[in-house]
Image: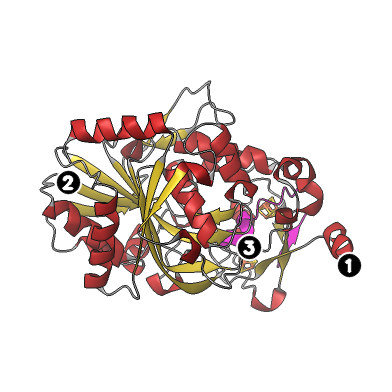
Amino acid sequence: MNASCAFIRWKVMSMAGRFAVSVTRASSYEEQEVYKALMDALKMIDEPLKTDLPEMLFKVNLLAPKSPENCVTTHPSLVKALMKFARSRGFLGKIVVADSPGHLYADRKEELLTLTGMYDAVKGDDNAMATVLSDLGFVTLERPENFVLKNPRLSKRYFDAPYVVNVAKLKTHAETEITACIKNCFGIADTDTRKKAHLSVSIERLCNAIIDLYLANPPKLNILDGIYAMEGNGPTHGKPRFAGLLMASENALALDFVAAKAMGYRNPLSIPLLKLAAKRGIGPSSMNDIDILGVNPEDLEIKGFIKSSSSLRMLPTWLRGWTHRWVALRPTLQKATCIKCGVCAKVCPKGAIKMDPFPEIDRGSCVKCLCCHEMCPTGAMEVSENLVMKLLRA
Ligand code: SF4
Ligand code: SF4
């Protein structure tokens, strides 16, 4: 589809207030199968890939140096399929595959890109590279219109990219409940900016900060790797779960709505991140604004999918910001699996953890951001409900 056709279609969709999300199925990460699922998904949304640019950035999810079977990161088979597809449509420019890992892995680039399979994914294409988003430094933006991050520092590589394809992973998240396309854009900021987003007990503040970052350079195309998803308390220590789904859309929020449906949320607007994004007008305001292509919406749900155990889910969205302090999940140490590495203390944005020799959490300073849980290499920093929530459930 040429640029003017794409523009007219976008205009018509916007005027009609409708958004398209295509869904295809794959039974494994076997390369031919992933390629076919991707091709079918992109065809259904009229292949919105722009091919006359000098460079394209695939913003993958590389949260930690883990092998693909752990389901923490975007699978390399999908990256390979997308590269092959772009080349088959005549894209001759440079392809850059990149993300920022959690900041304690920032100096472990080689390990990150080797273990996640990204170096292998770009092998054989002379005009493609895998890297980290910090490799060209950062730019500071003046964004008075932002809700939380007025001066975010963003990856220069990401901010300058003429065309970003968001290649996200379908996972649960102990704090934001799901992580799919919008949350995947959190990784474009530097460590200090991400820490600022986590500085408050307010879930609303964190979600609005994520949306601020998403809006800095919204991806033109969004693809979600849900062939194997993560269930339970993601995004690092949940359990891999076969879901067999691949999704694509020009609109990240529309895709996240459909992803939430697949995870078993009857109403995606019960997820604060999606509700706030809808309020800020970055996509559909309800499922009624979305055309799901390729599957019967009734057959979308992943049967028995285990959501994150966030207690906040029990409350109406409007109450969550106020009550976060009392009911949010909190980090709890399991000494038996703790290796006393101190990573949790390093990542804590509030300096609430002291090592002695095991981590000790100052509950008064802790804002329950769960960064320590997310980054703990052994899963020793678990999450649990606090007393108030346990009493309410009893
Ligand atoms: S809880 Fe995890 S991150 Fe913290 S010291 Fe123990 S093993 Fe390291
Ligand atoms: S102790 Fe953990 S949950 Fe609490 S503020 Fe620090 S990183 Fe966040």
Q: Where, quadrant-wise, is the C terminus in this rendering?
A: bottom right
Q: Is residue 363 magenta?
A: yes
Q: Secondary structure at mark 3?
A: loop
Task: Please give the range of residues in magenta.
Answer: 357-375
Task: Give the residue type at disc 1.
Answer: Ala
Number of marks in picture: 3
Q: Secondary structure at mark 1?
A: loop
**Foreground pick, 251 / 154:** 251
Colour convention: secondary structure
> Is label 3's Cβ within 8 Å of ligand 2?
no
Q: How far from the left and from the top, in percent, is residue 279? A: 58, 33
Q: In the picture, residue 358 is in which quadrant? A: bottom right
- From the viewer's perspective, is the residue at label 1 or at label 2 nearer? 1
Q: Please rate how many residues cluster around mark 1, counting C-alpha atoms within 10 Å: few if below 14, some from 14 to 19, many from 20.
A: few
Occupied quadrant, residue 69 = bottom left
Q: Are marks 1 and 2 in contact (CB under 8 Å)?
A: no
Please state which of residues 63 and 230 is positioned toward the viewer in this rendering: 230
Whether residue 7 is visible, yes or no, is yes
Please give the residue where the numbered disc 1 appears in the rendered image. Answer: 394
- At label 3, the amino acid type is Ser
Read off the residue under disc 2: 94
Percent x, y for residue 268? 58, 50
Residue drawn where x is 56% and y is 44% of the image: 274
- Position of residue 217 in the picture relative to residue 266 (left or right): left
Q: Label 3 vs label 2: CA separation?
A: 38 Å
Q: Is residue 383 above or below residue 57?
A: below
User: Residue 337's image quarter?
Assistant: bottom right
Distance of label 1 from label 2 (alpha carbons): 57 Å
The earlier-in-sequence mark between 3 and 2 is: 2
Q: Position of residue 361 (x, y in %)?
A: 75, 57
